[in-house]
């Protein structure tokens, strides 16, 4: 954010189109692509799940991302107030602000477990640098990871550190430096993933990985899996969590929302698919289980780092990049809450961050302990971590998305969406409108009813 570019409204703005793209890409690319996508793909049977996920990105994620950026930019406030003011302008009820609130809260809740997983990644920087993976068998690397999970102090130390760094950056508003760093670091991360795909090709099981990812077997696709694929489309694009809407509120009028969105959607998807291509061949080459769960990348990739030439350097750099990617996403999750507190109570960003930090930390303890002390403390068969993940990705985000689709295509005047989106008034705009009016809501409703076993 650049205070020199403050428009007449007094709100801060990104200085250039590039800074918005970097910040939004930084928000989108994170643990969702590299940690979550491979492990849920493994748990949900592969190809068919990936296909549903890709379809959700295309017909739900991308048009909805345009809508969210638009609402943010038009509303020029935090998500609840942006929704309320646009609703008012369109002559509708201010109750729409509930949708904004749901996003702000979802972002906060996600952050509480996201920092725990980011902590695993930070912790693995020094493990990799110590040549710990070299010469270890897959079983030894597996028990190394289990060892970390079973140690609450270690998990809490790292997640607390991640929380402190995130809040410090957001509180001080030193993000512009970070955005510039993203410009260099994201391509580096991409290069490292490509190197890992290269390694995966040498395992002799590359095609098995490819076929697992892209050969759909619909008998493996449960209705629950479809909901998870839908939820992940939201998660990975940072949708319905306040993040994109808040970043959109800092976006200058001159930028084309449509073009920017398509770029982010493509990059995010490519990174996730490459991560899958890097990981599954290693899974099959070492007789591991694709459905191993949240530890999947923390076992498979270290096996590769232990075996490949220059593995120690590649591994160390990889976990550094992954941690930074997680950090730029984490920042975007807390920004909506900070923006709202500052707007409401006129307190400094730093104070807002301190207040939020306490709540965040408490929730993060629940997630960290879900992997050890509270492993067996389950409600509806889910640990605390599972519950927060499920509540946000499989309930709050899809429902928030449904509401936002209806809001942007049925409530807001066409004139406004035409002005804002940058799709013109012709075919492209009508495709967007039709998708948002009918296809997106219907798809979300069908996936839900199906998962609830109603249809
Ligand atoms: N999109 C991020 C990722 O894939 C996660 C995220 C979710 C970020 C919600 C912001 C808001 O890692
Ligand atoms: Na993502």
Image (cartoon, rainbow, N blue to C red):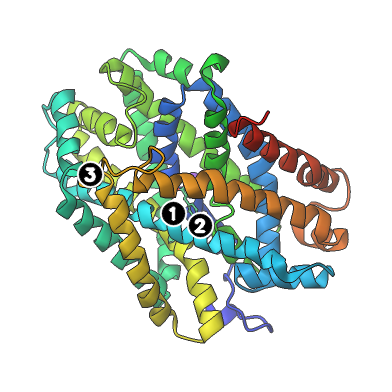
Gap between marks 2 and 3, in whole Å? 32 Å
- Residue drawn at (49%, 69%), measured in percent from left and top? 337
Sooner in the amino-acid sequence: mark 1 or mark 3: 1
Left or right: 405 as drawn, with respect to 300: right
Q: Which residue is mark 1?
A: 110
Is the C-beta separation of discs 2 and 3 under 8 Å? no
Gap between marks 1 and 3, in whole Å? 26 Å
Gap between marks 1 and 2, in whole Å? 6 Å
- Residue drawn at (13%, 28%), measured in percent from left and top? 140
The x, y position of residue 323, in whole percent, is 32, 51
Q: Is mark 1 within 8 Å of ligand 1?
A: yes
Residue situated in front as seen by the camera: 66 or 22: 66
- Is residue 152 placed above or below 39 in the rendered structure? below
Q: Which residue is mark 2?
A: 106
Q: Is residue 1 visible?
A: no
Is the C-beta separation of discs 1 and 2 under 8 Å? yes
The x, y position of residue 377, in whole percent, is 29, 44
- Is residue 397 placed above or below 289 in the rendered structure? below
- Residue drawn at (72%, 41%), measured in percent from left and top? 440
Which disc number belongs to residue 32? none
Q: Is residue 214 visible?
A: yes
Callout count? 3
Which disc number belongs to residue 316? 3
Sooner in the amino-acid sequence: mark 2 or mark 3: 2
Residue situated in front as seen by the camera: 296 or 446: 446
Residue situated in front as seen by the camera: 85 or 381: 381
Q: Is mark 2 within 8 Å of ligand 1?
A: yes
Mark 3 crowd level (few <14, some 14–19, many ≥20, 10 Å Cα): many
């Amino acid at each position: 954010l650049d205070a020199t570019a403050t428009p007449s409204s007094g709100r801060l703005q990104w200085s250039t189109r590039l800074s918005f793209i970097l910040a939004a890409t930084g928000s989108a690319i994170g643990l969702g692509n590299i940690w979550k996508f491979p492990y849920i793909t493994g748990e949900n049977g592969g190809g068919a799940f990936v296909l549903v996920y890709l379809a959700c990105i295309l017909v739900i994620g991308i048009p909805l991302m345009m809508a969210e950026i638009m609402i943010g930019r038009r509303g020029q406030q935090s998500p609840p107030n942006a929704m309320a003011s646009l609703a008012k302008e369109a002559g509708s009820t201010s109750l729409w602000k509930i949708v904004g609130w749901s996003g702000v809260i979802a972002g906060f809740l996600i952050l509480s477990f996201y920092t725990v997983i980011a902590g695993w990644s930070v912790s693995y920087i020094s493990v990799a640098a110590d040549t710990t993976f070299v010469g270890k068998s897959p079983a030894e690397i597996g028990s190394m990871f289990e060892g970390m999970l079973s140690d609450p102090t270690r998990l809490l130390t790292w997640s607390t550190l991640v929380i402190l760094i995130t809040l410090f950056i957001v509180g001080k508003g030193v993000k512009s430096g970070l955005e510039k760093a993203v410009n260099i670091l994201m391509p580096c991360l991409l290069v490292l993933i490509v190197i890992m795909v290269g390694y995966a090709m040498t395992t002799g099981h590359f095609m098995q990985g490819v076929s697992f990812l892209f050969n759909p077997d619909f008998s493996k696709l449960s209705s629950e899996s479809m909901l998870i694929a839908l939820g992940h489309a939201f998660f990975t694009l940072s949708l319905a969590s306040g993040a994109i809407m808040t970043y959109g509120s800092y976006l200058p009028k001159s930028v084309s929302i449509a073009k920017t969105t398509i770029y982010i959607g493509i990059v995010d998807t490519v990174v996730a698919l490459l991560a899958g291509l890097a990981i599954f061949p290693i899974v099959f080459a070492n007789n591991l289980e694709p459905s191993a769960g949240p530890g999947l990348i923390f076992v498979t990739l270290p096996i590769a780092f232990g075996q490949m030439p220059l593995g120690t350097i590649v591994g160390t750099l990889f976990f550094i990049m992954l941690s930074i990617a997680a950090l730029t996403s984490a920042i975007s999750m807390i920004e909506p809450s900070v923006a709202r507190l500052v707007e409401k109570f006129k307190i400094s960003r730093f104070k807002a961050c301190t207040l939020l930090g306490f709540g965040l930390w408490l929730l993060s303890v629940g997630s960290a302990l879900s992997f050890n002390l509270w492993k067996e403390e389950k409600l509806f068969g889910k640990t605390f971590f599972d519950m927060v993940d499920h509540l946000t990705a499989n309930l709050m985000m899809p429902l928030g998305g449904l509401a936002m689709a209806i809001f942007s295509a049925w409530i807001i005047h066409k004139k406004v969406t035409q002005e804002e989106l940058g799709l013109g008034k012709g075919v492209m705009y009508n495709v967007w409108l039709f998708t948002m009016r009918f296809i997106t809501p219907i798809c979300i409703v069908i996936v839900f009813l199906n998962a609830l076993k109603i249809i």
